[in-house]
Image (cartoon, rainbow, N blue to C red):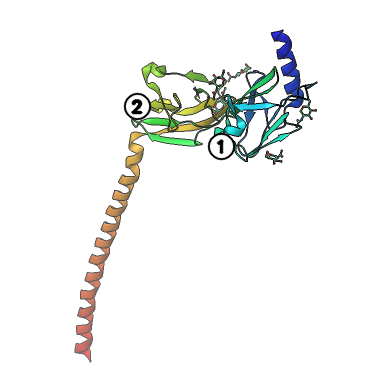
């Protein structure tokens, strides 16, 4: 009986799912992913409905008409069989259900996860590295981290708490997602490479460059050298200038004597 129900639900969802809601990546038929600002459409059409009863829609076990955040944002179509929520926002995720008499259907509605890292990350050797994986799509999925040494590397290695001889630490990121930030206390040259974070089916990467500790010093030394050379030039120039002035006055004197 359960398998039959599941098969029906599966059939129904694969036919009835609107363009903006589809199967969860892990194949759970009740999982629906939505994109922000797009409509969430749930279709509960029951083949031969008992016309004396009406569809009852709930979000997290509360009737949708009682939820303040949903007020004025949704429409019931097809005699209440279709729930259409306009311009979705992050907090529209949750467990939605509809019932018609004894028949019931449920969906776990989740924001489609998107992971983001900056394109490039630069640190100086010895500095602390902290990579923040920014995730959109509630409820937030677990975040995992991977590393590969070059863009053409064949395999990337998972980075976990304690990887790299205990140097890798996973912390909460700015959004409070556990494991959403990767920390290396003291950057070594060998830490350079491509770091990616994955949230659900989405992943992004950043290229980490570790600069030589003296690399930051060179421009400073360069400026010092420049200042030194400039001072030297000015000094020499000043000396040259004062000398001809004396010579000039000498010739002037001669001229005066001649005239
Ligand atoms: C809902 O599902 C029914 C039956 O599968 C279909 O006839 C109807 O067009 C669907 N409505 C929407 C809005 O997808
Ligand atoms: C989106 O939902 C809103 C509110 O339910 C509805 O008025 C609008 O027609 C829907 N748009 C589409 C493209 O389905
Ligand atoms: C929805 O249901 C799932 C599975 O029963 C549960 O783990 C999850 O916490 C529920 N979500 C909400 C927002 O209640
Ligand atoms: C990458 O993997 C492919 C297929 O597994 C293999 O043929 C190729 O030699 C590998 N390249 C390197 C650089 O390891
Ligand atoms: C290595 O990292 C680069 C950058 O993220 C990526 O393009 C490449 O596909 C990665 N290689 C593997 C095997 O993950």
The residue sitting at 20% across, 75% down in the picture is 246
Q: Tell me the residue that label 1 is attached to.
A: 69
Q: Residue furthest front?
A: 52
Residue 22, percent from left and from top: 68, 26
Q: Residue 252: tell me if it is visible.
A: yes
Q: Can you say which quadrant of the picture contains the C terminus?
A: bottom left
The residue sitting at 35% across, 45% down in the picture is 219
Residue 127, percent from left and from top: 34, 32
Q: Can you say which quadrant of the picture contains the N terminus?
A: top right
Residue 201, percent from left and from top: 59, 25
Task: Judge by depth and name the residue closer to the eye, 214 or 64.
Answer: 64
Quadrant of the picture in which ligand 5 is shown: top right
Question: Does mark 2 have its CB less than 8 Å from ligand 5?
Answer: no
Residue 227, percent from left and from top: 29, 54
Per the rendering, the mark at residue 185 is 2
Question: Helix, strand or loop at disc 1?
Answer: helix
């Amino acid at each position: 009986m359960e398998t039959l129900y599941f098969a029906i639900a599966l059939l129904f969802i694969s036919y009835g799912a609107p363009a903006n809601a589809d199967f969860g990546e892990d194949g759970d038929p009740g999982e629906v992913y939505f994109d922000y600002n797009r409509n969430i459409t749930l279709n509960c059409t029951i083949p031969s409905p008992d016309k004396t009863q009406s569809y009852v829609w709930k979000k997290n076990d509360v009737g949708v008409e009682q939820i303040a955040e949903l007020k004025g944002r949704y429409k019931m179509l097809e005699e209440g069989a279709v729930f259409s929520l306009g311009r979705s926002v992050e907090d529209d995720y949750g467990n939605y259900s509809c019932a018609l008499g004894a028949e019931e259907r449920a969906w776990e509605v989740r924001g489609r996860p998107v992971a983001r890292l900056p394109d490039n990350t630069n640190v100086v050797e010895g500095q602390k590295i902290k990579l923040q994986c920014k995730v959109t799509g509630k409820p937030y999925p677990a975040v995992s981290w991977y590393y590969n040494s070059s863009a053409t590397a064949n395999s990337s290695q998972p980075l976990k708490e304690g990887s790299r001889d205990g140097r890798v630490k996973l912390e909460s990121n700015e959004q409070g997602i556990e494991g959403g930030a990767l920390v290396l206390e003291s950057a070594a040259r060998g830490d350079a490479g491509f770091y990616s974070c994955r949230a659900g089916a989405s992943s992004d990467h950043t290229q980490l460059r570790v600069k030589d500790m003296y690399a930051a010093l060179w421009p400073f030394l360069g400026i010092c050298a420049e200042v030194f050379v400039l001072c030297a030039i000015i000094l020499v120039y000043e000396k040259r200038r004062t000398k001809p002035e004396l010579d000039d006055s000498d010739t002037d004197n001669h001229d005066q004597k001649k005239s």
